[in-house]
Amino acid sequence: MNPFPLTAGHPRLRHHVLEPRHGRAPRRTFVLAHALGCDLTMWDELATHLSADSRVVVYDQRGHGGSEVPAGPYTMAALADDASRLIDELQLGPVTWIGLSMGGMVGQELALSRPGQVRALVLANTTSAYAAEARTGWAQRIAAIEQGGLAAIVDGAMLRWFHDGFRAAQAATVARWRDRVLSCDTAGYLASCHAVAGVDTTARLPRIDVPTLVIAGELDLGTPPDMARVIARAIPQARLVILPQASHLSVLEQPLAFRQAVEDWLQGLPD
């Protein structure tokens, strides 16, 4: 049973809207976009915090969670189109977009293709392109899934998502997200891998004309800080924050530091 509604447009996307708890008009409207293999629950803590005075929308990207799984492969442009339809259908825009990993890639493409829908961006643990060696790694990962299913790649994902100390101290959390990957629709995951592997926005980033916060994890092996530096240097209004003791899913490993980075940045923006 799906506890959250689905959009009317196709692919139908599961989403949840948190209205501001203070009962007044929202200060901002946020849309939060999750990483590959995750779902909208990745944002539970941050979404609750931001909804103190703002409207917050979380959603499952196509092929994930409770959203529809159209035939693949997917492209980043298609994922950005999904986000655009969500914003239009829920009459949200312009929004402050917070995306991590795949969600950050979608945010870049959305800000470039639909600039009127985005007023500010948070791009966390993400990249604007992969080098040839990394694209080869994605091809190998896709082949491994096609041969052995998600079980073939899930343990490698946990190594990239969480650093050694976190995995030792927070075994239950790691187990939960391991199960989340294994419960993904395999076809949807594979189709999304193609979109992620093909991300290519670097040359267009200087066209992004909104305040942007770029967050990197000090220990992130999947999208290391140098990838974040490329993005932050290219976007004119960008600020870079590198979170200590954080790997790929920094919002889960360092939720307070992630939240503080966002809050400090928001304080410098107009309402």
Image (cartoon, rainbow, N blue to C red):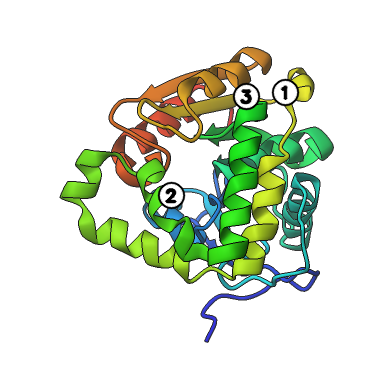
Residue under the image location 63 percent in, 17 percent down: 237
User: For the residues marked 3 and 2, what is the alpha-carbon distance in whole angstroms?
Assistant: 31 Å
Tags 2 and 1 in contact by the CB under 8 Å rule? no
Tags 3 and 2 in contact by the CB under 8 Å rule? no
Mark 1 or 3: the one toward you: 1
User: For the residues marked 2 and 1, what is the alpha-carbon distance in whole angstroms?
Assistant: 25 Å
Residue bearing mark 3 = 211
Residue bearing mark 1 = 202
Residue 217: image x %, image y %? 40, 30
Disc 3, SS: loop
Q: Nearer the viewer, residue 108 or 265?
A: 108
Q: Nearer the viewer, residue 72 or 254?
A: 72
Image height check: is 81 above or below 241? below
Residue 132 quadrant: top right
| The residue positioned farthest toward the bottom in the image shown | 1
Mark 2 or 1: the one toward you: 2
Q: Can the viewer see residue 236 in this picture?
A: no
Looking at the image, is mark 2 or mark 1 earlier in the sequence?
2
Apparent side of residue 157 relative to residue 196 in the rendered image (left or right) = left
- At label 2, the amino acid type is Ala
Q: Residues within 10 Å of mark 1 (few under 14, many from 20)?
A: some
Looking at the image, is mark 1 or mark 3 earlier in the sequence?
1
- At label 1, the amino acid type is Thr
Looking at the image, is mark 3 or mark 2 earlier in the sequence?
2
Residue under the image location 67 percent in, 18 percent down: 235
Residue bearing mark 2 = 157
Quadrant occupied by the C terminus: top right
Residue 268: image x %, image y %? 50, 22
| The residue positioned farthest toward the front in the image shown | 147
Q: Residues within 10 Å of mark 3 (few under 14, many from 20)?
A: many
